[in-house]
Amino acid sequence: MTLIKQKQGSNKPLRALGLMSGTSLDGVDAAIIETDGVEIFSHGPVRSVPYEPEFRARLREVLGKRGAPGNLIADFTRLQADFVLALLAANNLSTDEIDLIGFHGQTIFHDPKNRVTVQIGDGEMMAELTGIDTVAEFRHDDVAAGGEGAPLAPLYHQALARDLDGPLAVLNLGGVGNVTYIDGETVLAFDTGPANALMDDWILRHNGAPFDEGGRIAASGKADEAVLAKLLDHPYFDLKPPKSLDRDQFDVAKAISWLGLENGAATLLHFTSETIRRALPHLPGKPARWLLTGGGRKNPALVEAIKAVVNVPVEPVEAVGWRGDDLEAEAFAFLAVRSRRGFPLSLPTTTGVPEPMTGGHFYPAPSGARATA
Ligand SMILES: Nc1ncnc2c1ncn2[C@@H]1O[C@H](COP(=O)(O)OP(=O)(O)OP(=O)(O)O)[C@@H](O)[C@H]1O
Ligand SMILES: CC(=O)N[C@H]1[C@@H]2OC[C@@H](O2)[C@@H](O)[C@@H]1O[C@H](C)C(=O)O
């Protein structure tokens, strides 16, 4: 990466490393950026590592629970700390060249209406193991203040989009889907519905693969219209934003159980694209363009179905030079810097907090504890 010379002053850019483990449970992503919390000055090295099936199963076991065994939290944190050190070593960076880690952790439970959101991961241990100052627990304060606690990437989307013409929609197709509508200073966001999680679960159960590569299985089937209508008959889609979802909030197992592999996959894929149709009336205007991020943008069958729904250009975020595999890790690097600077992480229009709010908990690295990378 080309590292810019750091500006002096209170808002000098920091070199931050974001760590994201998303609802797909597919693995962990890390990305380094340089930012002052407003502008992004450079995009640095990235790294992704898939979880071993056994580790994924351990995470899956605690989904929907309000806590996790201490040894899982410690193993999860250690794995991510080792991953940070490996990323630095691979890029000849030492730990003292990184100012801050933004450690999202793994969401295992999300119930903002009852003011609870649980991300496992131990920020203090991360700071100790890496020797790098760490910000964690990004969603807690938002939820405690009555916000949804999610999505949090929208302010990063807005920062990235500052030179692009609006109105545009950034659609993240992860385990859960979330959209950010941006038009100048207007930014509005919410979770659209399930994106890949239900499809992944279906494929895993039926043929043991982690996901439907290229959407090929779904493309070889036919969506069952009656089942689709039943799935879409859910109060979530009529709720006005802000709104957010837990990974497993849609229990579709019974409705689709009798469908075969291909038709079940096709039905779930169209369920995802139809959730976008249901999102349209909640946007403040009609986006002139949709930019897709997250793993679902690599599923051509899903992308085609979304194109048919929105009827304006739909492109991967790479079309505007962003990094679709790394955007969320970058977002938590960005948010970590904003947290240190006391800048808002969320707005009434992104999570429903009563007023723009900062958040995140700071864990300073113990002095003299710089790990060798
Ligand atoms: N080549 C591909 N073909 C089809 N689907 C793919 C492909 N690559 C990734 N995906 C889908 O994308 C998912 C991973 O997406 P991503 O990494 O954006 O999720 P995440 O970050 O865990 O989720 P979230 O944004 O909800 O936290 C995979 O589980 C899979 O369903
Ligand atoms: C509670 C939680 O972890 N939500 C995730 C999830 O995954 C996608 C969607 O649901 C989004 O709301 C959020 O993640 C992204 C990174 C966000 O906060 O912007």
Image: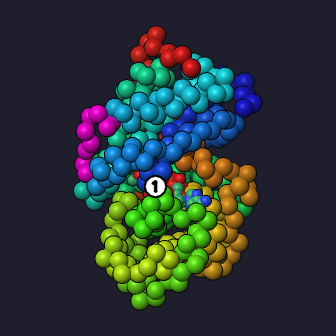
Query: In the drawing, does residue 166 fall left or right of residue 199?
Result: right
Residue at the image point whose x is 33% and y is 65% from the top:
249
Mark 1: secondary structure: loop
Q: Nearer the viewer, residue 307 or 113?
A: 307
- Is residue 178 something one can see in this rendering? no
Q: Quadrant of ligand 2?
A: bottom left
Q: Is residue 122 above or below residue 132?
A: below
Q: Which residues are magenta?
A: 65-73
**Residue most extreme to the front:** 207
How many residues crowd around disc 1 within 10 Å: few (fewer than 14), some, or many (20 or more)? many
Please provide percent x and percent y for residue 357.
42, 46
The C terminus sits in image quarter: top right
Q: Quadrant of residue 105?
A: top left
Residue at the image point whose x is 41% and y is 71% from the top:
240
Q: Is residue 337 magenta?
A: no
Residue at the image point whose x is 51% and y is 45% from the top:
50
Please provide percent x and percent y for residue 291.
65, 63
Please provide percent x and percent y for residue 137.
38, 39
User: In the rendered structure, which amino acid carries the disc numbered 1?
Assistant: Ser
Q: Which residue is the site of mark 1?
A: 24
Please provide percent x and percent y for residue 125.
37, 26
**Beta carbon at label 1 within 8 Å of ligand 1:** yes
- Is residue 366 something one can see in this rendering? yes
**Residue most extreme to the top:** 368
The N terminus sits in image quarter: top right
Q: Quadrant of residue 221?
A: bottom right
Query: In the drawing, does residue 371 fall left or right of residue 234?
Result: right
